[in-house]
């Protein structure tokens, strides 16, 4: 068991994947000598060389588009998108090519491409550095979208994503890069949680909080505060948005009767709308109250001085819990 | 206000003259010329092979158009006029090379041995391209303009990493050709692809068929400079070749591919040609271009000039023409019989290949679909949305 920050855990996971499989290579802007703007690829170019840790031109469509070609040739590229709001120039390659080539070729082509994207805000940065674009990709058939929230998951999920035969968007919780935690690097096959399985990270009885990525810790913080007032909240970390492990959430809701979702992404047409819809379908008679959603607003991400009012907070989560319990 | 009337216009480029610096080995009268940098020396059977490819490609195109008119195909993107460009480029390839085509590169595919019915299955709607991209060395058709160019560059970078460039082994050294049209050069991704390939010295030939029109927009609306000069800004050679001259296209693309295979890096080739028909069977070119322009290009027909040359050289005789006519007719008959017989896809098969690994939501939707389909009588619904 080692103590690691999430950023370091992804670095260690990338290193392990590159050591295991010579076909794995990293592509992105500033990922070589600099080690990436968040230093996630720190030291990898020194150890694996410029052909496997490739500093690219500043062109996001180029990063993803050429990664597609390399995958078609049998390599396993891992793309780094520098900031979440910079993924849009690559949107065409991700949605019209990467997501669809397997289906269009009737399964004859395989696209084992991973796209790492720092996700969410809370770091006081400028425009297009703090967005949560995950629903665009979760909505696109042919892609898998995962979001680790702990160092342990970050270490293992990046390796599982690289090993996947499908393209995976790997959302890194930007404001949690420095969050430390235990990482068990010695697990064997069958001991690692499957990539797309949600997990109950805190058992409770009064209501269920569902979160992923950067808001998983927020949900745990809110549950800790609620516990002081005698409210026992269960917290489920989705870990994956596509596929979505609805069963784990439904089991929890059948126990607690109440669901509050927490995401940084805007609630309007957001990823938790899907969770809410599926839970009302499968748990209608178990629900004691309507599903409540806490998230970002239907706005362009605001200036940094306002973001604390845009992002969900412990208070906003607890307000929603209170409304649910009062219903 | 201008006094220009609304209606078809002549495109900006000089169609009647030969653009400066264009490589040409066979002029529109079928007269052979030499070129100091680009030459081919072909055996008679090789020459006849090129001629056969072009004749069969034209027949394939006209038969496909007829099938569309009969309602057997939903759409057809015709290639008449571009036979020399596509056959010349296709025959320059080696088996191990890889093609990233646009949706009109039927001739290049036919030279790769792709079954023409697999091409037509796209336009009939039974498939997205029935060929095996790995076995054929041909990527699926790409309908999003220029989107295939970056994957082509990435494939070339993969080739570099496999050590399949510059080994001197003709069976091993590999190049990639990205096919696209004049309209594609306007896309941002095209600029990225050129730059990227040059920066990484990727073994890619960018093969631009400038057929003068992107649906209704003339090439003058795409670029104020000749397209091959884009290469200069990217840092690679740009070559302009007569796209209606199969010998020149073969020579130019062959040397560009060879350069790529040897580790010399990318080349941009602009094949100057003309789309004689509509963009697809859905548009009407008489609304946007003048008959005089089409007539002028008819004088430059790639088949006519090659036939004139081969006949004058004594390479082509009546026996071969008769045999080829017979072969063309057999191809047409095969298409006429084969297209209506293309198997209708099993509806549930649409769920099969979205993901390599199980996806619970897709599996659940598949189960729901199957249950509803069974309940509502497969026969009634077998015809689909029509």
Image: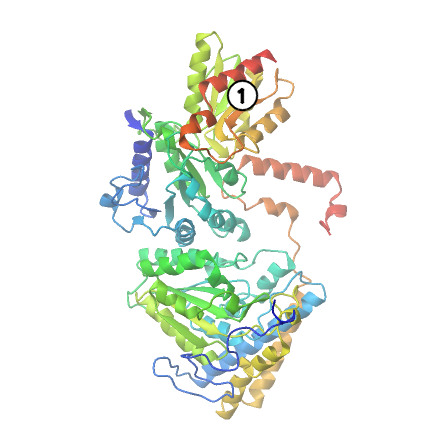
- Evaluate whether residue B113 shows in this view: no
Across and down, in percent, residue B142 comes to 52, 58
Vertical side of A137 occupied by B251: above or below = below
What's the residue at 30%, 32% (across, down)? A8
B11 or A289, nearer to the observer: B11
What's the residue at 28%, 68% (across, down)? B168
Looking at the image, residue B38 sits to the left or right of residue A102; the answer is left
Mark 1 belongs to chain: A
Across and down, in percent, residue A306 comes to 43, 28
Q: How many marks?
A: 1
Vertical side of B365 occupied by A152: above or below = above
Q: Residues within 10 Å of mark 1 (few under 14, many from 20)?
A: many
**At numbered mark 1, what does the secondary structure look like: helix, strand or loop?**
strand
Residue marked by disc 1: A260
B310 or A264, nearer to the observer: A264
Vertical side of A232 occupied by A107: above or below = below
What's the residue at 53%, 12% (across, down)? A206
Across and down, in percent, residue B89 comes to 45, 72
């Amino acid at each position: 068991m080692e103590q690691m920050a999430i950023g370091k855990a992804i670095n260690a996971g990338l290193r392990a994947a590159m050591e295991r499989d010579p076909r794995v290579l990293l592509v992105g802007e500033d990922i070589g000598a600099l080690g990436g703007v968040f230093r996630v690829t720190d030291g990898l170019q020194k150890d694996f060389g410029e052909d496997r840790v490739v500093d690219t031109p500043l062109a996001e469509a180029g990063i993803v588009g050429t990664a597609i070609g390399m995958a078609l040739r049998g390599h396993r590229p891992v793309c780094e998108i520098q900031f979440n709001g910079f993924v849009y120039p690559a949107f065409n390659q991700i949605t019209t090519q990467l997501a669809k080539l397997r289906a269009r070729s009737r399964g004859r082509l395989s696209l084992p491409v991973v796209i790492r994207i720092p996700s969410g805000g809370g770091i006081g940065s400028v425009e297009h550095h703090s967005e949560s674009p995950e629903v665009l990709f979760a909505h696109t058939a042919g892609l898998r979208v995962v979001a680790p929230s702990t160092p342990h998951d970050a270490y293992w999920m990046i390796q599982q994503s690289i090993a996947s035969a499908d393209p995976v968007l790997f959302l890194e919780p930007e404001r949690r890069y420095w969050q430390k935690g235990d990482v068990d690097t010695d697990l064997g096959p069958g001991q690692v949680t499957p990539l797309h399985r949600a997990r109950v990270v805190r058992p409770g009885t009064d209501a269920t909080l569902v979160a992923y990525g950067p808001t998983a810790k927020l949900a745990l913080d809110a549950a800790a505060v609620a516990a002081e007032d005698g409210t026992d909240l269960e917290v489920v970390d989705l870990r994956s948005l596509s596929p979505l492990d609805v069963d784990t959430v439904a089991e929890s809701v059948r126990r607690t009767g109440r669901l509050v979702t927490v995401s940084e992404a805007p609630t309007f047409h957001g990823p938790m709308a899907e969770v809410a819809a599926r839970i009302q379908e499968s748990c209608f008679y178990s629900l004691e109250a309507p599903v409540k959603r806490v998230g970002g607003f239907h706005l362009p991400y605001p200036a940094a001085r306002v973001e604390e009012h845009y992002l969900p907070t412990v208070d906003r989560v607890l307000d929603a819990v209170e409304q649910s319990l009062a219903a | 206000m201008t006094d220009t009337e609304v209606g078809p216009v002549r495109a900006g480029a000089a169609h009647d003259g030969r653009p400066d610096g264009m490589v040409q080995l066979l002029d529109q009268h079928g007269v052979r010329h030499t070129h100091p940098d680009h030459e081919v020396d072909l055996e008679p059977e090789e020459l006849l092979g090129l001629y056969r490819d072009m004749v069969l490609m034209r027949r394939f195109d006209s038969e496909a158009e007829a099938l569309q008119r009969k309602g057997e195909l939903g759409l057809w993107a015709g290639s008449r006029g571009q036979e020399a460009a596509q056959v010349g480029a296709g025959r320059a390839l080696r088996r191990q090379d890889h093609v990233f085509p646009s949706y009109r590169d039927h001739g290049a595919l036919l030279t790769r041995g792709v079954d023409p019915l697999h091409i037509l299955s796209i336009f009939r709607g039974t498939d997205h391209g029935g060929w095996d991209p790995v076995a054929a060395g041909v990527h699926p058709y790409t309908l999003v303009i220029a989107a295939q160019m970056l994957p082509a560059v990435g494939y070339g970078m993969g080739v570099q990493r496999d050590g399949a460039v510059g080994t001197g082994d003709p069976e091993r050294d590999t190049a990639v050709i990205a096919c696209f049209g004049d309209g594609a050069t306007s896309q941002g991704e095209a600029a990225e692809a050129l730059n990227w390939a040059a920066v990484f010295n990727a073994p890619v030939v960018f093969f631009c068929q400038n057929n003068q029109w992107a649906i209704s927009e003339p090439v003058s609306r795409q670029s104020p400079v000749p397209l091959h000069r884009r290469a200069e800004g990217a840092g690679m050679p740009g070559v302009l070749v007569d796209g209606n001259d199969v010998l020149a296209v073969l020579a130019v693309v062959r040397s560009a591919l060879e350069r790529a295979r040897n580790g010399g890096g990318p080349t941009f080739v602009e094949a100057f040609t003309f789309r004689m028909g509509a963009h697809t069977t859905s548009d009407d070119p008489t609304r946007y271009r003048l008959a005089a322009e089409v007539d002028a290009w008819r004088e430059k027909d790639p088949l006519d000039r090659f036939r004139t040359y081969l006949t004058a050289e004594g390479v082509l005789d009546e026996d071969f023409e008769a045999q080829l006519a017979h072969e063309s007719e057999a191809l047409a008959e095969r298409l006429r019989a084969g297209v209506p017989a293309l198997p209708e896809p099993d509806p549930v098969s649409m769920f099969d290949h979205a993901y390599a690994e199980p996806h619970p939501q897709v599996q659940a939707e598949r189960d729901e679909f199957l249950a509803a389909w069974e309940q509502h009588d497969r026969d009634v619904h077998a015809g689909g949305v029509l």
